[in-house]
Amino acid sequence: MWVRLFSICAVVSALSACVEEPVPVSPRVCEAGDLQYLVGRPEWALEGMVFAGPVRLIRPGTAITMDYRQERLNIEIGRTGRIIQVYCG
């Protein structure tokens, strides 16, 4: 009985070591916090801007993947052509 209990505890311990804790993402990781001033501006305000990491422009009707990348900057454009949201992911 003790061997069985020890085996179960060993398996549970090993599995719990494999679980990754979610890492809280700071808007500074992808510069989203610094770029909130873009919200409400027209899409053309992005012309000539250079970003440190990957950027994804999301326009109305655009199919996007559901993968989460904390370093990716997402810029969502509304139906009127104005930026409606800037966030990491």
Image: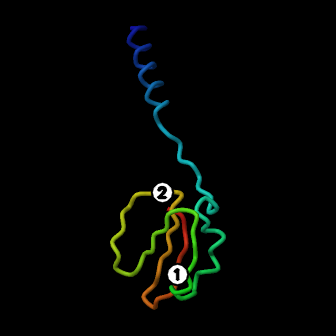
In the image, which disc is placed on residue 69?
2
What residue is shown at x 45% (from left), y 69% (from top)?
56
Q: Secondary structure at mark 2?
A: loop
Residue at image point 62% right, 58% down: 26
Asked whether the beta carbons under mark 1 and mark 2 sit within 8 Å of each other, the answer is no
Residue mark closest to the camera, 1 vs 2: 2
> Mark 1 sits on what residue?
84
**Furthest residue toward bottom:** 80
| Mark closest to the chain's N terminus, 1 or 2 | 2
Q: Is residue 39 left or right of residue 61?
A: right
Q: Amino acid at mark 1?
A: Ile
Against 49, residue 3 (above or below) is above
Q: How is the image coloured?
A: rainbow
Q: For the residues marked 1 and 2, what is the alpha-carbon distance in whole angstroms?
A: 20 Å
Residue 8 percent coordinates (x, y): 40, 19
Q: Amino acid under label 2? A: Arg
6 lies above or below 46 = above
Q: Which residue is nearer to you in this view: 57 or 27?
A: 57
Q: Which is nearer the eye, 81 or 54?
A: 54
Q: Residue furthest top?
A: 2
